[in-house]
Amino acid sequence: MSDEEPPDSPLDEDNYGKPRTFDPDFKGPVANRYCTDVLCCLIFILFIIGYILLGLAAWVHGDPRRLAFPTDSEGHFCGQKGTPNENKTLLFYFNILKCSNPSVIINLQCPTTQICVSQCPEQFLTYTEMQIKNRKNKTHWEYYKQFCKVQFDKPEKSLNQIVLTEDCPTAIYPSRPFLQRCFPDFYNRNGTLTIENRTTFDDGNGKKRSIIELRTAANGINKLIEAKSLGMKVFEDYSTSWFWILIALIIAMVLSWTFLMMLRFIAGLLFWIFMLGVLAVIGYGIWYCYSEYSTLQKKPSSDLTIYDIGIQSDFSVYFQLKQTWFAFMITLSIIEALVILMLIFLRNRILIAIALLKEGSRAIGYIPSTLFYPILTFIFLSICISYWAVTAVFLATSGTPVYKVITPGGKCVHDNKTCDPEVFNTSEIPKFCPGSMCSFAFYGGKSLYHQYIPTFQIYNLFVFLWLINFVIALGQCALAGAFAAYYWAMQKPDDIPPLPLFTSFGRAIRYHTGSLAFGSLIIALVQVFRVVLEYLDRQLKDGNTSLTRFLQYCLKCCFWCLEKLVKFLNRNAYIMIAIYGKNFCRSARDAFNILMRNALKVAVMDRVTDFVLLLGKLLVAGSIGVLAFLFFTQKIPMIIEGPTTLNYYWVPLLTVIIGSYLVAHGFFSVYAMCVDTLFICFCEDMERNDGSTEKPYFVAPNVHRILNKMKLVPQEQKK
């Protein structure tokens, strides 16, 4: 691994307290670089090659049609071209009443024979009734046999024989297709559940059954049908309003860009308005608590203390005590005082943070191409997500049909064991387990490939997370390099190098793929641990004790905090990589050291940036949301007329609001990276230079004026 430092590396820092030395000729991001973290780069490339080979293997062995088409009891697809079931696109259950058995949940398979049919039954008819009617008219058997097994053509067989061999259903009833399956055609008439005006039916075994039993067996089907109806209406709304949604998102894009350009003028105003609002809200809370406290002074019962009444399940009891309101008033007063003191004593740092926010807006104005970089990131992320999803589907559908024994009660010793449907009826299992059947369960196999499919799925997830974090890291490093080139230009914009974003992106790919892969690997490992914890939590939820649940919550919290911390450190490490071209560990150490030396500035900068960006996102999403509401609800027909055939106006409205927020987030993520980069450069500038003619500051004039007022730079420095 070659981690040799560039010969003109500007920073030479010692961890043992020795003074820092700087390269006097440093004029911006280092141009003469070497490849960093080569070993990690090679490992990353090998993992990607393995990922591609895994995708090819999954493509060879997998068959997504197994998810697209329903499968009968023998593992054959319904509706697959080139097979006997090509024209039989629907799956029919012989006795759907058995689908209410608890074994359905355990085995994910209904313990009844399932065959492919071309249409669903349209009438009530039992096997016995068919035999009687068939004596006069043979067409009854022709109709009924389409719901029997293909090889069966003996309508004279007795009902008992049919029940034993399950060659035909004992009864059929009106059904309709849904999700390529035949389900009872329920109707709600005056609050009563019916099928063709019937509330009862003959199950073919001489028993009268209630329609409610069918509903129980097909539990949730009506909700799915309603969901399908809702889905169709939502689809209609999207097809009607997609043009206006697109227009709204374009307006959100323009509004976000305008907001970022205006931040150089309104950043300070937004922050101080926000802070005054916070002080006003807290002040109102203090006044309200005092008012309640004064009112309760007149009630003798309010003199009781919280200790006197103890723990109460009804929290309203505590609000009848003046001690409660007094405690609230004191707490809010302390918070109010702390906020005021913070604004007073940190005012200079707040002014610097606001100045850097304005400078970030100016930087984006000089390098507008950075605002379009999120589109490239979105394309890369879409490719990664699509490849992961397709590979996961092909892996899940790899193998040959596996059959398992399913019994109505689920209590047989052979239940859930693998079986062979061709010899099942002649084996001993039906004798030991009456009513059992050998039914298709899933796709698998005994080869080495099929045995390691769960491992391949884990590998698929891990590399997916690694690639996702690498794409994000690449974007952060490329943007950081472009904005660093802006900061270290003495005369802005004349000294800004041409195509700074393209140059920075090329440097990141050519020299620092290994370093970016190293940082993204750390985050991916933490995320994998979080996924494992979530999986274990779901698997062990029923058997968890209070102690194990507590430990799981602690671990989840710790890994969540660890992920946030690593992302924060990595983000700043990528900035140092973009500027100085060092390896990941050295850059992370330098970033951590400079952040620790400016910890208070970091805290103030982050909070100010968060406030302004949050207001910006809410402003964009809220403004577009209000306009969309007025438009889609026909509140402004005199200005512009919206679509009048919407089923639910909230469908395009929510899409516009969420989409506008995401558009604003994409734009503001570039701005946040710009501010973070400028801040790191600013801290380096303050440590590297002294404002003299020999070592002038690179900071922008507006920030320089603030420093002059704070008397942190020599007054004689040229502006």
Image (tube, rainbow, N blue to C red):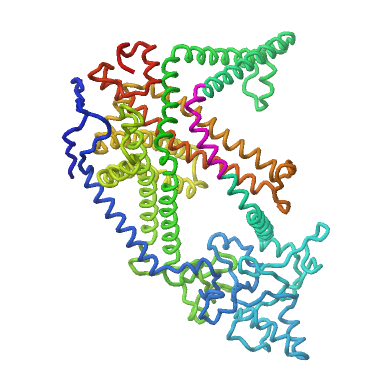
Q: Name the residue furthest front.
A: 494
699 to the left or right of 412: left
Residue 219 visible in the snapshot: no
Q: Which residue is drawn at 41% across and 63% down?
A: 395
Q: Is residue 343 above or below residue 69?
A: above
Up-down relation of residue 161 to residue 537 (above or below) = below
In the rendered image, residue 121, in percent from the top left (x then y), is placed at: 70, 75
Residue 292 lies within the magenta run: no
Position of residue 470 in the picture relative to residue 152 (left or right): left
Q: In which quarter of the image is the C terminus?
A: top left
560, above or below 74, in the image? above
Residue at left offset 60%, top offset 14%: 327
Q: Nearer the viewer, residue 233 or 196?
A: 233
Taking the spot 55% from the left edge, 40% from the top edge, the residue there is 661
Viewer-closest of 169 and 376: 376
Q: Where is residue 706 in the image (x, y as percent from the top left)?
A: 40, 16
Magenta residues? 250-268
- The x and y percentages for residue 711 are 35, 10
Give x and y (percent) for residue 264. 47, 27
Quadrant of res 311? top right
